[in-house]
């Protein structure tokens, strides 16, 4: 039996999901966005797209997702 033929770059494993989920939870919580809302879905889609494009560092992902959605975080004094 031949192993399934898939492009490994399209593979999204458990470790990838953990990174994206943790960033999503932070962004949604701090922006006051309900995770299952349309805005939550937009945030999730952007997050996964950026991750698949190679942005793997959580802080960079968070910053880019917030910028894409116009979410302003309070700055530390």
Image (tube, rainbow, N blue to C red):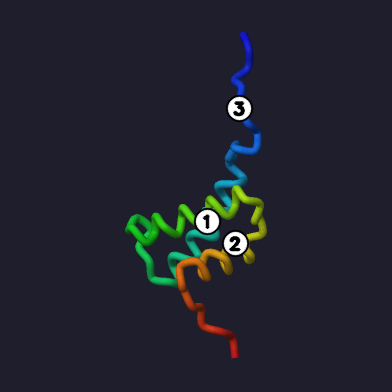
- Left/right placement of residue 23 relative to residue 60 reads left
Residue 4 position within the rendered picture, expressed as x and y whole percent measured from the top left: 59, 20
Task: Give the secondary structure at mark 1.
Answer: helix
User: Which one is nearer the viewer's eye here, 67 or 32?
Assistant: 67
Label 1 neighbourhood size at 10 Å, few (<14), some (14-19), many (20+)?
A: many
Residue found 46% across the figure and 55% down from its top: 44
Task: Give the secondary structure at mark 3.
Answer: loop
- Left/right placement of residue 22 relative to residue 44 reads right
Q: Earlier in the sequence, mark 3 or mark 1?
A: 3
Which residue is tagged 1? Answer: 47
Task: Give the secondary structure at mark 2.
Answer: helix
Q: Quadrant of the C terminus?
A: bottom right
Q: Quadrant of residue 58?
A: bottom right
Which residue is tagged 3? Answer: 6
| Labels 3 and 1 touching (C-beta < 8 A) | no
| Labels 3 and 2 touching (C-beta < 8 A) | no
Label 2 neighbourhood size at 10 Å, few (<14), some (14-19), many (20+)?
A: many
Q: Label 3, label 1: how many angstroms apart (C-alpha)?
A: 22 Å
Residue 12 bears which disc, if any? none
Q: Earlier in the sequence, mark 3 or mark 2?
A: 3
Residue found 34% across the figure and 55% down from its top: 36
Residue found 59% across the figure and 39% down from its top: 13
Residue found 33% across the figure and 58% down from its top: 38
Residue 65 position within the rendered picture, expressed as x and y whole percent measured from the top left: 52, 64
Residue 61 bears which disc, if any? 2
- Number of marks: 3
- Left/right placement of residue 46 relative to residue 55 reads left
Label 3 neighbourhood size at 10 Å, few (<14), some (14-19), many (20+)?
A: few
| Labels 1 and 2 touching (C-beta < 8 A) | yes
Q: Label 3, label 2: how many angstroms apart (C-alpha)?
A: 26 Å
Height in image: 15 above or below 62? above
Residue 42 position within the rendered picture, expressed as x and y whole percent measured from the top left: 41, 57
């Amino acid at each position: 039996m031949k192993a399934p033929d898939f492009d490994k770059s399209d593979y999204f494993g458990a470790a990838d999901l953990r990174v994206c989920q943790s960033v999503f939870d932070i962004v949604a919580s701090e922006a006051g966005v309900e995770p299952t809302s349309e805005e939550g879905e937009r945030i999730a889609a952007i997050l996964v797209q950026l991750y698949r494009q190679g942005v793997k560092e959580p802080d960079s992902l968070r910053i880019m997702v917030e910028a894409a959605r116009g979410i302003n975080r309070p700055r530390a004094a």
